[in-house]
Amino acid sequence: NDFPRPVFCESSEVIVRVQAASINEIDIDKCAGNLKLIREDSFPYIVGYDLSGFVVSIGSNVNRFAVGDEVFGCLTPTLEDDLDKRRRPYGTFAEYCICDESELAQKPVKIPHEIAAAV
């Protein structure tokens, strides 16, 4: 309960309850402050780009997913995120994450969330 649950900004967005997230080199570099010359983040900031979890809410233009679907994916950092910090202050190392529909895919049933987040 330390960070507010994300809310939609775009009609193509999906809110995912994160079950697993993977750690990549970019996450380590961000935590160590090695990327501050390239991208300055405002705080509080949650790192993480890869996730697997359950859809809990969908925007009005989302066609590929429904509430309850198991999904996995990778957030794509964009220039808009840099220019508008309110757009995506949430990374995947959180209980909930806001994603664009295009960043997600249906999680295969036989693959556990911990593996799907690392794909």
Image (spheres, rainbow, N blue to C red):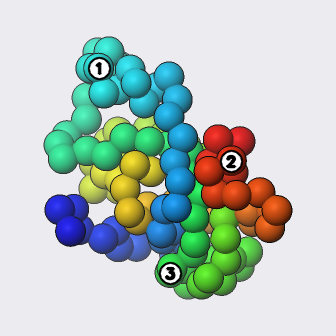
Whichever of callouts 3 and 1 sits on the residue coming sooner in the sequence is 1
* Residue 29 appears in the picture as rendered: yes
37 relative to 73 in the view: left or right: left
Determine the residue positioned at 57% across, 64% down: 53
Check residue 115 in the rendering and tell me which mark sits there, or answer none: 2
Quadrant of res 4 = bottom left
76 relative to 92 in the view: left or right: right
Looking at the rendered structure, the kind of residue marked 1 is: Ala
Mark 2 falls on what kind of element?
A: helix
Determine the residue positioned at 80% across, 67% down: 109
Q: Nearer the viewer, mark 3 or mark 2?
A: 2
C-alpha gap between disc 3 and disc 1: 33 Å
* Residue 78 appears in the picture as rendered: no
Quarter of the image containing the C terminus? top right
Q: Nearer the viewer, residue 56 or 20?
A: 20
Quadrant of res 36 = top left
